[in-house]
Image (spheres, rainbow, N blue to C red):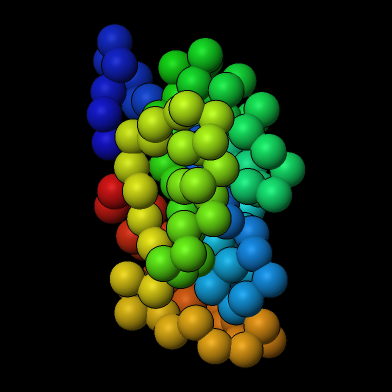
C-alpha cells in the first residue's frame, strides 16, 4: 500500500456490479472491504456512474477498478468519462469462472478480497 505523508492512501473500489456471478462478486467484495475497513476502503457500483470516482479522486484516493469479466464494464465507464484508474483487476483472472448468476460463494469473495488487499 502506498503511503502519503506517513499514512496509508485510501482506495476507492469501482466495482462492475453486473448481473453475472462475477459481477455480483465484485460488489460483494468491495462492500465487505468498505464495511470491514471504512478507514481504508470505499465502494462504488459502476452502474451508478462515475461521480463517486471523481469525488474520491479529488480527495486523493487510489482508484481500483474491479471488473467481473473480460467485458470490463467498469473500465469502459471510466474510459468514457476520461478517467484512468491506478489499478485494474478482473475477477475471472483470479481463477473464478463466470457461470450462472447464483454461483456466488463466500470463498470467492475471500479470494477477491485477498487480491484487492495485495494490490
Quick check: can you spot residue 37? no
Quadrant occupied by the N terminus: top left
Q: Residue at x 62, y 33 (%)?
A: 50
Task: Using the rendered view, name the quadrant where residue 54 is placed.
Answer: top right
Task: Work out whether residue 119 or residue 24 is closer to the camera in this orientation and state it.
Answer: 24
Q: Residue furthest front?
A: 80
Residue 96: % across, % down: 41, 80
Residue 99: % across, % down: 54, 88
Image height of 25 relative to 17, above or below: below
Q: Residue at x 48, y 64 (%)?
A: 71
Q: Residue at x 35, y 26 (%)?
A: 8
Give the total number of marks visible in the rendering. 0
Q: Residue furthest right?
A: 48
Task: Using the rendered view, name the quadrant where residue 53 is placed.
Answer: top right
Image height of 83 relative to 102, above or below: above
Task: Work out whether residue 22 or residue 105 is closer to the camera in this orientation and state it.
Answer: 22
Residue 102: % across, % down: 68, 86
Q: Residue at x 63, y 53 (%)?
A: 31
Residue 14: % across, % down: 54, 44
Amino acid at each position: 500500500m502506498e503511503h502519503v505523508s506517513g499514512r496509508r492512501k485510501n482506495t476507492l473500489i469501482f466495482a462492475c456490479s453486473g448481473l453475472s456471478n462475477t459481477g455480483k462478486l465484485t460488489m460483494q467484495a468491495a462492500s465487505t472491504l468498505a464495511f470491514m475497513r471504512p478507514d481504508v476502503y470505499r465502494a462504488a457500483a459502476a452502474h451508478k456512474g462515475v461521480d463517486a470516482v471523481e469525488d474520491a479522486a479529488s480527495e486523493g484516493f487510489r482508484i481500483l477498478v474491479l471488473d467481473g469479466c473480460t467485458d470490463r464494464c467498469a473500465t469502459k465507464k471510466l474510459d468514457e468519462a476520461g478517467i484512468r484508474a491506478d489499478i485494474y483487476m478482473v475477477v475471472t483472472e483470479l481463477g473464478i469462472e463466470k457461470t450462472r448468476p447464483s454461483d456466488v460463494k463466500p470463498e470467492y469473495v475471500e479470494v477477491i478480497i485477498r487480491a484487492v488487499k495485495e494490490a
